[in-house]
Structure formats: structure tokens, C-alpha cells
Image (spheres, helix red, strand yellow):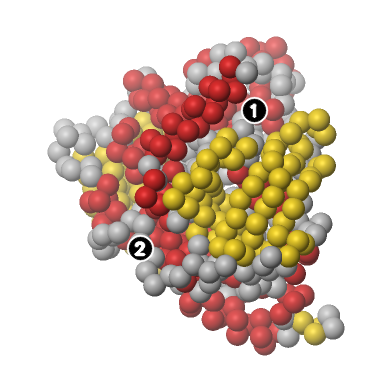
């Protein structure tokens, strides 16, 4: 007989104008790693927010049975008292507090009369860090001195400090590189050996198939398929078909009838210094070009300087002591700020859509039109509201943003649809050059496919497209040419017939070893 730590029965949840979940049933066995996957907006996070008390009892219908007892959680504290802890995609850490303070945030170690015992706090925090593989970190340091991967592990330490028995992780590796992701997954497997049950939400199917005992696929608010390791086939194609409701025969759609035109953008001897250290060179003598109708990819490891290159080119949004030339359509141009970049028909979709790409509390139409507002939707400072509405509706349909209205707040959209809003915002500026930095980070395979199709359409319309991605198969799959960046320098250029992960990594490793020998 199965030993279920959790049963969710007939869970139904509605938002204004949206049926988020319909009679969802989920069973999780004690001590297993149970994966939830599905397209953005399928209902995965909503289901976990119900379980953790983010959406309180009576805001949904159905039952939560935990350790054999029906539970009615009215707030997060109620679920945490039972040993259920959720770690959201956006880390709930306070940057300028110490690691120790963050580990016990909301769970302070107090002595007599409610006064915090700082000696006990630091001692226990150090013990928690040992549990998550960070034994050498100084718990007195501010949390913002750690990289994102280590901050994610501190979140797990924070959960362990609450005596967690069921750990929920929502997209825990979305912002991590491969090495950091592998370390986090190893920690999860270690927690499993200690009897801790985990539910993990992720779009990285290779990770799910590696560590999960069971996979539940949710589509349009309903459970479509349950897979059990050792019994069912965990092949990615099977999971994808269940997620999107169709077979994706071409993960990276072929771009046809696309003619390459003249060189639209050329960058010469681009050098950039770190914004906080004028003596530290981040980019050195970078040279590249991109043609009309061409998709050029930038490959490299974390820290290679890809995002720094994109931001420094786009109105000097990053760095100082920037030198070099930008030549657009054969003429040298001066771009000192973002306004100059937009006027020169450049656009940049940032890697962090929530921090740099969107105003989450604002509606969809304002987010879509804000970059183009001064140039296309106003006359002498007077906004043409009707044209804003018309164009927002047009782009909502043309790039298939799933929302009930252009007046819907962006924060209520799924990650994939938020990404489409960012793309629409920059397409509306009528650019000739689009720089797409991590265009599919944190979104599902179905939404990725739609964005790949959009990239193809942009190229076919004569745009010059630059794609930066930490997923090497993605760079290879969408690009016509690839530049390889390592430690701030271009170390190679490849045409399509030369593409392979092995060839790219070989060049990076050789360059790194060569520098170390000097």
C-alpha cells in the first residue's frame, strides 16, 4: 500500500475571467521527488500556491490531505507549521542582510524575552549551510555577496531550518548555469536520502527525468499524464507531447525563404571596463557584424561577457570607459544612451524580463507600447490612446499572447506570455537590429517553439537578429552564424556547417588553457 504524504483532491481554482485549475488530483509518496511540468500558465504554480497557503482556504474548492489529515491553510505560516515549505522562482532573500539573518528570516532564534540570540543564529546557520554543501561560507557576509546558485542553496538551508518535510521548488534552476544546476540537484537527491519529500517545477526536462521518481504533466489546468520511473517511458518527446497537446517534430523550426542582405551592423574594437572598477577590462577588442535577414548567435560560458556586450552596445547601459565603433548601414554612429539606440533602430530584450523588461504592476498595453510611445504614439507630447489600443490588440493576436485583455496586469501572465510582451514592446519600435538576451529563459517548450518561429519571421522580414543564450543547443538551433565569446574576447566564428557543442566547447577550453599558460 502506498504511503502518501500528500493528496490533493479535485482542486479547482478560478481567477477573474480565467479557469486556472479544474478538478486536479495529485498524489505524492513520502520520500520521493515528484516533478510537475507543463506549459507556462498550465496551473503548476497555482496548484503549489494553494498547497502552501499563498491562495488561502475557500479561495478554491477541493481537499488537501497531508499526513492523513485534511488541512485548511489560510496563510503560508499555516503550511510551514506542518513542514511544507515553498521556494519561489524569485528568491525571498533580503540582499543587505547577512546569510545567517536570511536563513532564519521569519524564523528568528530568540532567547529570553523574545530577544534574538545572535550566537545561536550564526551557529545554526553554519550547520544548515553544511547540509546544503556550503560549509566554507561566512554566515556573517551579506547575502548579495553570493552568486545566484549559492543564494538558491541558502533558500534550501532556510527551508531546512524550518524542519521541512515537504519541500516545493518552483523553477529552482532557471537562473543557474549547468554546474550550479547539477549541484542543486545533487543536494535534492541527498535530501531524499534523509527522508525529505520534494516537489519540483521545472521546464528543463533533462533535469526532471534525471532526478524525479514521478512526473505529473498539467495542461490547461488539468492533469494529463502521470509517469512513474521504472514503469513508464520518461522520454522527453513523450513529456513534450503531453505538455503541448501535439508532437513537436522540429524543436528548432527551419527558416525558409530567407535571403541575407547587406551588413546592417558592424562593431569594431569594442572595449568596455567594469562599472565599479575602471581598471578591470570586461570586453576587449570585440569585432563582429550581422546582416539583414541573419540570426547571429553568441555562445560562451557564464561570465564570458555576452550580456555585458549587449548592454554596453545598447546605449552604454553597462560599463565605463567604453571605446570602439558602431557602424550602422555603413555609417559610424554615436550612441550614448538608450534613446540614441532606439532612434538608430536598435532594440534589446534583456535577460531579466521582470527587472529590466517589464513594469509588472502595469497593464499589458502600456508595457507593449512604452518604448515606442515617444516615437510612434504621440504628437508633440500628446498620446494617441486609440492607436495604443489598436496596436496592442494587433500584437496580442499576432504573437499569440494568452491573456483575456490588453488591460490585464503583466504580473498575472505566465512567464512565456510575459516574454512575448517584452518582444512586442521592442518590435513596436520598428528596429532593424534586435538583440535577444536569453529570449526563452524560464519558459516551457511550447512557448519556446513559438518564440523560435517569431525569430524566424523577424529574420525573414529583413531584421538583423542577435541571440544570446546559455543553452548551447538553442544557439546552435536558431543561428546562421555563431561568435564564440570567452573572458570578454571573441575567440572564434562559425558557419552553420561547423556547428556542434563539442566544437564550441573545444575552442573555449583551448583558449582558457592558453591564457592560463601565459
Is 415 placed above or below 97 here?
below
Is 49 placed above or below 247 here?
above
Q: Quadrant of residue 145?
A: top right
The front one of 104 and 317 is 317
x, y (%) of residue 236? 27, 47
Q: What quarter of the picture does the C terminus occupy?
A: top right
Neighbour tally class for label 2: few under 14, some 14-19, many 20 plus, Cα within 10 Å: few
Residue identifier under label 1: 146
Q: Which mark's residue is nearer the viewer, 2 or 1?
A: 2
Q: Residue at x 74, y 34 (%)?
A: 281
Q: Residue at x 25, y 51 (%)?
A: 237
Q: In the structure shown, which secondary structural element does the residue marked by tag 1 occupy?
A: loop
The front one of 484 and 390 is 484
Q: Quadrant of residue 234?
A: top left
Compared across the picture, whether 434 is left or right of 21 comes to: right
Residue 184 in sight: no
Q: What quarter of the picture does the N terminus occupy?
A: top left
Residue identifier under label 2: 254
Any mark on residue 280, and which?
none
Is 444 placed above or below 413 here?
above
Q: In the structure shown, which secondary structural element does the residue marked by tag 2 occupy?
A: loop
Residue 476 in sight: yes
Compared across the picture, whether 92 is left or right of 301 comes to: right
Neighbour tally class for label 1: few under 14, some 14-19, many 20 plus, Cα within 10 Å: some
Counting labels gives: 2
The front one of 154 and 378 is 378
x, y (%) of residue 449? 39, 60
x, y (%) of residue 433? 61, 64
x, y (%) of residue 232? 17, 42
Is 193 placed above or below 317 here?
above
Are the two marked residues, 2 and 1, in contact with CB atoms closer than 8 angstroms? no
Amino acid at each position: 500500500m502506498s504511503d502518501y504524504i500528500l493528496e490533493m483532491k479535485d482542486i479547482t481554482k478560478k481567477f477573474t475571467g480565467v479557469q486556472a485549475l479544474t478538478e486536479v488530483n495529485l498524489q505524492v509518496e513520502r520520500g520521493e521527488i515528484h516533478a510537475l511540468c507543463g506549459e507556462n500558465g498550465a496551473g503548476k504554480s497555482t496548484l503549489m500556491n494553494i498547497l502552501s497557503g499563498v491562495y488561502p482556504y475557500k479561495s478554491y474548492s477541493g481537499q488537501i490531505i497531508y499526513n492523513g489529515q485534511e488541512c485548511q491553510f489560510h496563510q503560508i505560516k499555516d503550511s510551514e507549521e506542518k513542514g511544507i515549505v515553498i521556494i519561489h522562482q524569485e528568491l525571498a532573500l533580503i540582499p543587505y542582510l547577512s546569510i545567517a539573518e536570511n536563513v532564519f528570516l521569519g524564523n528568528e532564534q530568540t532567547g529570553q524575552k523574545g530577544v534574538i540570540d545572535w550566537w545561536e543564529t550564526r551557529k545554526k546557520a553554519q550547520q544548515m549551510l553544511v547540509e546544503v554543501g556550503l560549509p566554507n561560507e561566512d554566515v556573517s557576509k551579506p547575502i548579495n555577496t553570493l552568486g545566484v546558485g549559492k543564494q538558491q542553496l541558502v533558500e534550501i538551508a532556510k527551508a531546512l531550518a524550518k524542519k521541512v518535510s515537504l519541500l516545493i521548488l518552483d523553477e529552482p534552476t532557471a537562473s543557474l548555469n549547468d554546474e550550479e544546476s547539477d549541484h542543486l540537484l545533487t543536494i535534492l537527491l541527498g535530501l531524499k536520502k534523509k527522508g525529505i519529500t520534494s516537489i519540483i517545477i521545472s521546464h528543463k526536462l533533462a533535469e526532471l527525468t534525471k532526478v524525479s521518481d514521478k512526473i505529473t504533466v498539467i495542461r490547461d489546468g488539468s492533469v494529463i499524464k502521470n509517469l512513474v520511473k521504472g514503469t513508464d517511458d520518461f522520454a522527453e518527446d513523450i513529456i513534450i507531447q503531453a505538455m503541448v497537446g501535439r508532437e513537436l517534430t522540429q524543436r528548432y523550426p527551419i527558416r525558409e525563404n530567407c535571403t541575407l542582405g547587406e551588413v546592417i551592423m558592424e562593431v569594431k574594437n569594442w572595449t568596455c571596463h567594469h562599472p565599479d572598477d575602471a581598471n578591470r577590462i570586461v570586453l576587449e577588442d570585440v569585432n563582429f557584424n550581422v546582416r539583414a535577414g541573419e540570426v547571429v548567435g553568441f555562445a560562451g560560458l557564464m561570465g564570458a561577457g555576452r550580456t555585458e556586450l549587449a548592454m554596453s552596445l545598447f546605449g552604454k547601459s553597462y560599463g565605463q570607459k567604453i571605446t570602439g565603433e558602431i557602424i550602422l548601414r555603413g555609417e559610424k554612429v554615436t550612441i550614448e544612451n538608450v534613446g540614441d539606440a532606439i532612434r538608430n533602430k536598435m532594440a534589446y530584450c534583456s535577460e531579466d524580463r521582470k527587472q529590466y523588461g517589464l513594469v509588472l504592476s502595469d497593464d499589458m498595453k502600456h508595457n507593449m507600447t512604452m518604448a515606442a510611445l515617444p516615437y510612434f504614439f504621440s504628437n508633440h507630447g500628446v498620446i494617441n490612446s486609440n492607436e495604443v489600443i489598436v496596436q496592442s490588440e494587433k500584437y496580442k493576436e499576432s504573437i499569440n499572447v494568452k491573456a483575456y485583455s490588453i488591460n490585464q496586469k503583466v504580473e498575472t501572465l505566465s512567464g512565456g506570455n510575459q516574454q512575448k510582451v517584452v518582444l512586442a514592446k521592442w518590435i513596436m519600435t520598428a528596429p532593424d537590429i534586435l538583440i535577444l538576451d536569453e529570449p526563452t529563459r524560464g519558459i516551457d517548450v511550447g512557448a519556446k517553439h513559438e518564440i523560435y518561429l517569431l525569430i524566424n519571421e523577424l529574420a525573414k522580414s529583413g531584421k538583423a537578429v542577435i541571440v544570446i543564450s546559455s543553452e548551447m543547443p538553442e544557439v546552435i538551433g536558431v543561428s546562421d552564424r555563431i561568435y564564440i565569446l570567452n573572458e570578454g574576447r571573441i575567440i572564434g566564428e562559425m558557419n552553420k556547417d561547423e556547428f556542434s557543442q563539442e566544437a564550441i566547447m573545444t575552442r573555449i577550453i583551448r583558449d582558457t588553457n592558453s591564457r592560463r599558460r601565459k
